[in-house]
Amino acid sequence: MTSILASDELGPQGRRRVRIATVVSALVLGAFVAVALIRLGQQGQLEPELYTDLFQAAVWRRLLTALVKYNLSVALLAMALSLTIGLGLALGRLSRSAWVYRPLGAFVEFFRAVPVLLFIFLANFGLPQYGIDLGTFGFVVVALTAYHSSVLAEIYRAGILSLGRGQSEAALSLGMSYWQSMFLVVLPQAVRRMLPAIVSQLVTLIKDTTLAFIIGFSEMLREGTRIAEFLNNRLQTLLLVALIFIAVNYALSRFATWLERRQRRRYGGVVTPAPGTLEDPALLDQPEVATVR
């Protein structure tokens, strides 16, 4: 998430170089945009009729229906399952028993390493071979849950380890059991720190729902291609689909930013670092992990 970087203030030469680099970058970007517009105009892709067709009520109704009925529904269900399963995986990885945290660690690392698209293929074509028929909707939920639960497990674990061990020690000194201290003292504080990271993961999950297009799932991207074939304006329709996804994910990103700022103001500026960064508590040595458990 947010990292505090210490650096010296730029001097006159440094500021001059920054301004020059900014101007050069803007000119290069403007040149690319101009060339792209010229090429699109030469191929007739800037004709007004190709864009005015997208303002039909039927087009927006079909796109927004697919977004809510498929993309958001799958994302919310997969997120709910991933939050639950991820919490179990995180607690298991913090277990004292090597018979528990080692297999679960291997499980999490495996599912984090495999691409989401491969999980979608495996769920759609592999599960029916064993008599498990969940429908396309169910297969997409299973695939997304398998991947994102392992990612959320690391987010949970990082949030728990970001707390001082004095929290659990104080709870144990009051006579609480390990699980009582975890659920009544540690997790409520850790969840507050993890909220921005969890919301950011939801943004990624919503984008991953479009990968189900490859197996015929009727989400908004697939619906957009059908509309594009009917209107014969593939570039314009897919651009509209992209803008809708940008609007949805931007709203969620702003919500995550608001949560992060609220957490800093309310709880002294501590937020959960992104998993895998140098500040990630999950990357601490195993002896430190043992002290928290």
Image (tube, grey):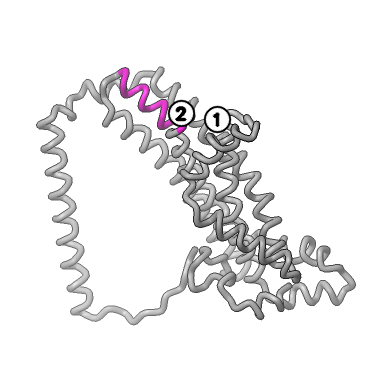
Q: Residues within 10 Å of mark 1 (few under 14, many from 20)?
A: some
Choose top left, top right, bottom left or bottom right for residue 6. Answer: bottom left
Q: Position of residue 131 (x, y in %)?
A: 65, 31
Frontmost residue, 17 versus 228: 228
Kindly identify the residue that appears in the image at 63 percent across and 48 percent down: 82
The outermost residue toward the right is 175
Q: Which residues are magenta?
A: 215-230
Q: Position of residue 109 (x, y in %)?
A: 56, 60
Q: Amino acid at mark 1?
A: Thr
Spatial separation of the CA atoms under disc 1 and disc 2: 8 Å
Frontmost residue, 270 versus 261: 270
Disc 1 target residue: 136
Q: Position of residue 158 (x, y in %)?
A: 60, 66
The magenta stretch spans residue 67? no
* Contact between labelled residues 2 and 1, with CB atoms less than 8 Å apart: yes
The magenta stretch spans residue 221? yes
Choose top left, top right, bottom left or bottom right for residue 80. Answer: top right
Kindly identify the residue that appears in the image at 51 percent across and 63 percent down: 274
Q: Main secondary structure of the magenta part?
A: helix
Kindly identify the residue that appears in the image at 44 percent across and 46 percent down: 250
Horizontal side of 217 relative to 158 (left or right) equals: left
Query: Dot 1 lies on which element?
Result: helix
Up/down of 291 relative to 83, above or below: below
Horizontal side of 288 relative to 69 (left or right) equals: right
Query: Dot 2 lies on which element?
Result: loop
Kindly identify the residue that appears in the image at 63 percent across and 67 percent down: 267
Q: Amino acid at mark 2?
A: Gly
Query: Which numbered disc, 1 or 2, marks the residue that appears first in the sequence?
Result: 1
Up/down of 231 relative to 28, above or below: above
Disc 2 target residue: 216
Horizontal side of 231 relative to 165 (left or right) equals: left
